[in-house]
């Protein structure tokens, strides 16, 4: 079921997810392989580098209304050794360079 939902999400990404995917795909960032809309346990994460255990979440305004749910989700993932980078949609649109730099910095911190 999660795999089917992940496939569905991959077919209909948000504009911001498309933009970030162009920066992450084909090992373009630090030579790291990312997967998009990937199931991890009960969750589907936007992007993940399994080798570095780094998750990148692109958050829209709906996440402001679900802060507690996101906190519990983050905690569950972090307890399993993942590091999360959250980037707001607005930052992808208005400050893409810094958004990508924050992902790059997180990747370097994992080495």
Image (cartoon, helix red, strand yellow):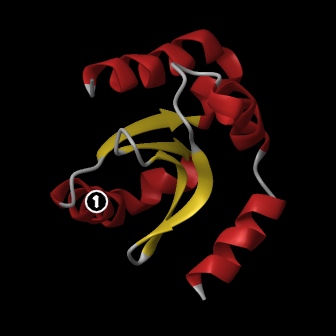
**Residue 111 pos. (x, y %):** 27, 23
Residue 4 sits in quarter: bottom right
* Residue sitting at the far right: 11
Residue at 49% x, 47% y: name it: 48
Q: Of 46 and 92, which appears nearest the observer? A: 46
Q: Of 83 and 16, which appears nearest the observer? A: 83
Q: Of 41 and 15, which appears nearest the observer? A: 41
- Note whether residue 61 is visible: yes
**Residue 97 pos. (x, y %):** 60, 10
Q: Quadrant of the N terminus?
A: bottom right
Residue at 27% x, 28% y: name it: 110
* Residue sitting at the far bottom: 1
**Residue 108 pos. (x, y %):** 34, 18
Q: Is residue 44 left or right of residue 67?
A: right
Q: Tell me the residue that label 1 is attached to.
A: 77
Q: Of 24 and 17, which appears nearest the observer? A: 24
């Amino acid at each position: 079921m999660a795999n089917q939902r992940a496939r569905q999400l991959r077919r209909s990404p948000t504009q911001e997810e498309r933009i970030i995917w162009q920066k992450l795909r084909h090992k373009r960032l630090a030579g790291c392989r990312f997967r998009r809309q990937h199931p991890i346990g009960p969750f589907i994460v936007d992007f993940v580098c399994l080798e570095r255990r780094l998750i990148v979440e692109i958050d829209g305004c709906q996440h402001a209304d679900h802060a507690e749910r996101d906190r519990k989700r983050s905690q569950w993932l972090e307890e399993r050794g993942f590091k999360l980078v959250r980037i707001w949609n607005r930052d992808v649109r208005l400050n893409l360079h810094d958004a990508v730099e924050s992902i790059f910095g997180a990747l370097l911190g994992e080495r």
